[in-house]
Amino acid sequence: MEISQINEKLLYHDSFSVSRLKKQVMANKTTHQTLVAVNNLQNLSCRISRRNQDDAKNDNPMANQIAVGLLLFTDVRHGIKAGDTIEVTSHSQSQSYLAGEPYMYDTHQQVVLYRKDDA
């Protein structure tokens, strides 16, 4: 059995899908960037781990801010790029994150995911 098959069966219990900004030239010659789903990077297996806890300090008294960092572990064959939007589903809940630069190992890749938002 291959390492990727072992990871798939034993370790990867979460899933993710990737969207990427794509430039589109409009009829009036202006360009817009649109978030487009990457066809071969939809509903793939992964493992999610917390990188850091939500920082409780709040610089804005008008909003409860969230700053979360996660680690995504998945197969090296998945072409994730820094700046991609990653929709992660874990324990039946979905959330969008921004992908950092992937780090490749022999058996898997690790991607830091960021989320900054107001609660």
Image (spheres, grey):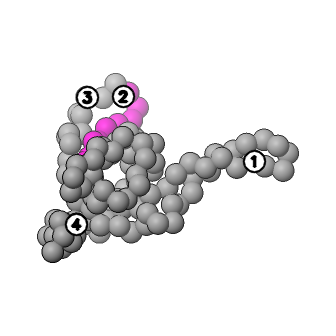
Residue at position x 39%, y 69% in the image: 43
Please report contact status of discs 3 and 1: CB closer than 8 Å, yes or no. Answer: no
Instruction: Tell me if residue 70 is in the magenta stretch.
Output: yes
Q: Amino acid at mark 1?
A: Val
Location of residue 56 by image quarter: top left
* Residue 48 in view here: no
Please report contact status of discs 3 and 2: CB closer than 8 Å, yes or no. Answer: no
Camera-side mark, 2 or 1: 1
Q: CA distance from mark 3 to mark 1?
A: 42 Å
Residue at position x 35%, y 60% in the image: 77
What secondary structure is found at the residue carrying circle 3? loop
Q: Tell me where residue 104 appears, x and y as whole percent.
A: 27, 47
**Magenta segment boundaries in residue numbering:** 60-71
Which residue bears the numbered disc 2? 61
First along the sequence among labels 3 and 4? 4
Which residue bears the numbered disc 4? 4
* Residue 10 in view here: yes
Which residue bears the numbered disc 1? 25
Q: CA distance from mark 3 to mark 4?
A: 40 Å
Q: Amino acid at mark 3?
A: Lys
What secondary structure is found at the residue carrying circle 4? helix
Relative to 5, residue 60 above or below = above
First along the sequence among labels 3 and 1? 1
Which residue bears the numbered disc 3? 57
Residue at position x 73%, y 42% in the image: 31
